[in-house]
Image (cartoon, grey):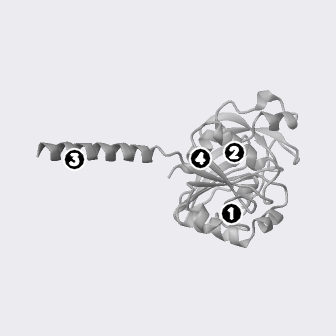
Amino acid sequence: MAEFLRTGTLLAALLLISGAALSSTPPRIAIYRGDAGCDDCSETVRRSIEASGKYQVEYVGPDEPLDVTSESLKRFDLYIQPGGGQNIPAALRALGGQRSNAIREYVDQGGHYLGLCMGAYLADANNLALIDEELDSAVGRPGFPVHSIDDAAVAVEWLGHQDQMFFQDGPYFPASPSTGFKALGHYENGDISAAAYRYGSGKVVLTGPHPEAGLAWFEQAEIPVSRMPKSDVMGSVLAEALAR
């Protein structure tokens, strides 16, 4: 009897250890890399995520070991569509119908989508249709400080605090009556700069500015380094995108 109890206690301990190990498995993140993005956009996203050491990150796309399919996306907790150029229809064509359907199915069945700038535009009602609204550029909006598509840094209220972020003709987000909609940040003119939505059983987080932009982007655009974010904006948007 004593031996049985010792064996049972050992088994219970092993199960607890195994459960703890499983619960501490880092979230798995897929980043699209391909013609629907821009040069170095996917790589910049990956560098910004891996700097924290908290996540497992893989590229997915037409020239990667894993393409964007319904089956491959099941492996991941979050799919990221990075920035791109100015031509949204061309980006959607480059993504293609099968990948677009796979992304919608993934989110509908409980997956999470993070769209950064171009990736946000691609989520709108005219493209992947992950949200009900059509999106337009923040440039030219009343009170918005940027008046061209040139790279800039913009002031934002971000998850309750003030900061600055890299901006490349990103969208603003109309307030939505959709269930699950939440404004995550605002530009200084009051327009929404980032938002969360529900799609089916999944979650969609979209941001107009680039939380992933690092020193190299600011230097290349000749934006003063003093205008870089003071807080971990990429870490906070990832936490929001992964949260249930």
Q: Are marks 1 and 2 in contact (CB under 8 Å)?
A: no
Residue 105 appears in the rendering:
yes
How far is disc 3 from disc 1 in space, using C-alphas? 45 Å
Which label belongs to residue 58?
Answer: none
| 61 or 109: nearer the viewer | 61
Circle 2 residue: 46
Circle 1 residue: 67
How far is disc 4 from disc 2 in space, using C-alphas? 10 Å
Circle 3 residue: 8
User: Hey, what amino acid is under mark 4?
Assistant: Gln
**x%, y% of residue 127?**
73, 67
> Upstream in the sequence, badge 2 or badge 3?
3
**x%, y% of residue 82?**
73, 52
Query: In terms of secondary structure, where does tag 4 sit?
Result: strand
Q: Spot the residue most to the left.
A: 1
Query: In terms of secondary structure, where does tag 3 sit?
Result: helix
How far is disc 3 from disc 4 in space, using C-alphas? 35 Å
| 221 or 47: nearer the viewer | 47
Q: Residue at x 75, y 69 (%)?
A: 96
Badge 2: residue crowd in 10 Å (few <14, some 14–19, many ≥20) = many
Circle 4 residue: 56
Badge 1: residue crowd in 10 Å (few <14, some 14–19, many ≥20) = some
Task: Please tell me whether mark 3 or mark 4 is closer to you in this view.
Answer: 3
User: Hey, what amino acid is under mark 1?
Assistant: Asp
Q: Residue at x 29, y 42 (%)?
A: 13
Q: Say above or below: 10 vs 114.
A: above
> Upstream in the sequence, badge 3 or badge 1?
3
